Amino acid sequence: MKGWAIKTLFAGVAAVGAGALAIPTFNGLTQRSDVPIYTVERSSFTRTVVANGILEAEKTTPLTVPSEVRQRLTVAWLAPDGTHVESDEIVVRFDPTEMQQNLLDGQAEKDTALNRMGQKELESGAVFENLERDEQMASRELDYAREFQSKDEEIFSRSEIIESQIDQGLATRRKDHARETRQLQEELSTVELELIELQKKKAEFKISQADSALRSLEVRAPHAGIFVLERNWRGVTQVGASVWPGQPLAEIPRLDVMQAKVYVLEADAGGLKEGVEAEVVLEAYPLTRYRATVKKVAALAQRRNRRSPVQYFEVILELERTDPDLMKPGQRVRAELLLADLDDVLSVPRQAVIKEEDGDTRVYRRSAGEYELVKVELGASALGRVVVEKGLEEGDVIALADPTLRSKGADVLDAGSDGPGGPGDGS
């Protein structure tokens, strides 16, 4: 930076000296003789961008409401948010009152079903005995009617023969009716017993669910780490809250591997991609720097605050090492990302570049005491400087201001001159 200032100073002095001998022209217009200039040279070029964010664990184990529970649960106790927990340590307890009541209700329903089943079997047994006795009696009557049937026309009168046939038919129907009634009763009893069996199984399922829920009312840490409650638009889960199976409750990040999540302004994201090198500093420990690499870049820029139109790219940085003694999830960090690191390139101050209406970019290059507009192609840019890929060569002298515009000093001299029409005009 000092070199650039010295070169500009000497170049400016040389330009002023040259202006005492001749005033350069541009397309017939008088050019300024006090234009600041810059001599193009090759050098290294770096572009960095600063982004803020937080630390987070690369791997996190989520804790949810046990899926074995098929009903709403009430949180009875929670481990304090942010506390360190050991493996298999209890971190969440649920209220067992409802499950205990369901267990008692299920056992009562099962006992009722068993009582009904026993009573139904006794009733069915008595009915079957009566129906079987009726069928046997009907069978004996039929045998008697057949044995003593009056069918000899020489011995019995026609009316006796008809009466005997009727008795035999009635006995047959009574036997068939007794048999069909017993079969229907057996089927009906079987259906009723099956319904009672279903009620018993339903009660057993209710008992099983309640028993499983009671065994699942404690959530334990799967490994050591920090217990972090789940955040949402309503805040964090609290004691007394109603939760449902599968609902996220908290998470336990693994502290052995950490990463940084930072946000880069959309306007500064040129050249941002995976593999870019970076350095991360913990705001709580600003003297220690950690090397990192861009691991992931969000596909789209988004707002961080819905009230602000400014958009950012979310960037995940993979840290070269993790310091478990200092690093904790949620700590604020500041990252410096190296978006460009070029050697032996031509770069010029941004103020020398003119963007014209046709979209082309040009600079004023001095040649033989005059300035001419030359088209240039630009590359990477940083704050105050930009790389020129085509259009200039090392050693070229360019203007840092428009040489065709009159300087303020010249305007003042013209306004106070004694020329025609001026204040010093004696005519």
Image (tube, helix red, strand yellow):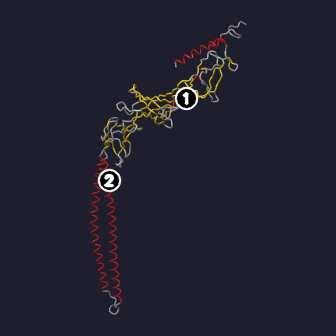
What number is the disc on residue 206?
2
Q: Quadrant of the C terminus?
A: top right
Disc 2 element: helix
On screen, residue 247 versus residue 343, left or right, reads: left
On screen, residue 177 versus residue 272, left or right, reads: left
Task: Please identify the quarter of the rendering in which residue 410 is found.
Answer: top right
What number is the disc on residue 380?
1
Q: Confirm or deny contact between disc 1 and disc 2 (CB under 8 A).
A: no
Q: Label 2: how many residues lie within 10 Å, few (<14), some (14-19) or many (20+)?
A: many
Q: Could you tell me which residue is drawn at 62 percent across and 24 percent down? A: 363
What number is the disc on residue 11?
none
Q: Amino acid at mark 1?
A: Ala
Q: From this viewpoint, which residue is outermost toward the top?
A: 426
Q: CA distance from mark 1 to mark 2?
A: 69 Å
Where 402 falls versus 139 (above or below)? above
Q: Amino acid at mark 2?
A: Lys
